[in-house]
Image (cartoon, rainbow, N blue to C red):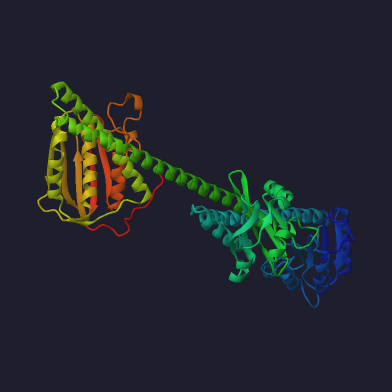
Amino acid sequence: MTDTSHNRRQPLILVVDDGMTIRLLVREALEQAGFFVEEVEDGRQALTRFQHLSPDIVLLDVMMPELDGFQTCAALRQMPSGEHIPIVMLTGLEDEGSIHRAYEVGATDFITKPINWVLLGHRVRYLLRASRAFAELRQNEEALRQEVKISTTLAQVGRELTSSLATPVILERLCQLTAAVLGCESSHALLWNSERDVYTPVASWGYSSQQWSTLQNFSAPRPTLIPFLRNLAREEVITQGGTPMQSRIPDSLLVPFGLRSALCLVLRRGNEVIGVQTVGARESSLQFTPQQHRLALGIAQFAALALENARLLEQAESANRLKSDFLATVSHELRTPLQIILGYKDLLLEQTFGPLTTEQIETLRRLERSAQGLLELINNTLQVGRLEAGQLPVDCKEVEVAPLLTELQNEMWDLFQQSGLQLECLADPILPTVNTDPNKLKVVIKNLVGNAVKFTEKGTISVVAQAKGEGVEIAVTDMGTGISTEDLAVIFEAFRQGEQKVLTRRHGGVGLGLYIVRRMLELLGGSVSVESVLGQGSTFRIWLPQQRPSLAMPIPVAA
């Protein structure tokens, strides 16, 4: 308890000396210098008065009965408010031992007797300035420690919240983190149900299973909360400190959850307020500190970021599903009439309906090539839809690569006859078998070879298989146009090609072949890479493990 009988705008000096004359002289000198002075005659009185006065500085005689100056100084330093206060020893002892002992027990400085009364006021004023400077430094250091602690805590919270893109997981983590970080008993999240126009609990921490089962039936109509929600949207954090006069949180959000003290923070998705996160105490009244308020603001901001990321992912996945469904439907509807057209083309070429002229046959051949190209595009589109929906089954078996390459060479003979290019297939005499799906491996190699044919005007396309690590590498090399550094970064994405300007492309296709290669290799547990020099050609390398990993399962991926 502090004595307020003097004006604390001026420093208060406590003088401790058993000599009345010294005390009077010190008082006179210090009062003339503009200080307030309180005086006591021994150490015990000094300890008692110190607790009541909370002086700014203590002038302490060394030689006193009962408690001497050294003992009194040591006792003052043990008091809560005495740790940093300036203590000046008044001593007639000039031996080094007394000086050392004074500093050892915590003295700030010492003044030898006889005292220079002119310099005393200046000495005290200097020590007070130094004391204030050190006090400000300690305050700044403490503030810095608090900032570091808050920043470190919020960084950990941010990592936890943003590490997931699933809204239910984010809300569960948010409940646990807010209770732990803010030191509260429980936490729960209310989200707005737009169909019913009410706020309902969706996640919690700190409630028993029975309590939570009961609370899940709770709902708060939005119209009754509009004033509170308006304030929350503006302030982001609102606290209720345990007394009715301080409460700005509606009882309807506290009483059903048995909370006596609570802090509410806003839950946003972008700029939209979607809910309220409440953290609090059921058994005791909490006074939330400014540090807790700042932590709550930071948590609210990270929660908004995490929820917005989750919303964007949900939108992307929804758009991706719609796109896949649309592509599958359109492709299916196009393939049926196209197959009918190809069937009639075969009947015409077989001259079922009568003889054809050479010009008519050539026209049907051109129609066949165009229709086959369109059918390949439709089939690729259907494959993409199945890949992204995780509906493409994998039928693995032991496969010898060399015979498979021979089969491919025979199947692609017509393509190379038409293009005028040469196909060269080479396989290492000693190749391990690979546990994979042969049909999908054929699709991968055909897509790579077909892509090479598309971008090569003359020369040879080679397919070379060799053992590499615990698997087999198959390299497809062409002598075509090559790929620019910029395009290398995107060629394995869906609907991307090296030539991005549609109106000026010299080559057909819509950019699905290499995307299918990458996705199918992911299913087979393999990988694909590319090396290319613009104007000289490209080499695509696929690698397959001898044993397909069990984790390589069809997984839908947002395009």
Q: Residue 43: image x %, image y %?
A: 80, 73
Residue 252: image x %, image y %? 72, 59
Residue visible at 16% across and 21% down? 359
- Which quarter of the image is occupied by the N terminus? bottom right
User: Camera-side residue: 55 or 398?
Assistant: 398
Quarter where residue 254 is shown: bottom right
- Residue reaching furthest to the bottom: 66
The answer to which image quadrant residue 115 occupies is bottom right
Residue 206 visible in rendering: no
Quadrant location, the C terminus: top left
Residue 282, position as x, y percentages in the image: 69, 68
289 and 32: which is toward the camera: 289
Taking depth in this image into account, of 231 and 35 the one nearest to the observer is 231
Q: Is residue 136 above or below residue 458?
A: below
Say if 479 sits above or below 242 in the image.
above
The residue at 68%/52% (across/down) is 237
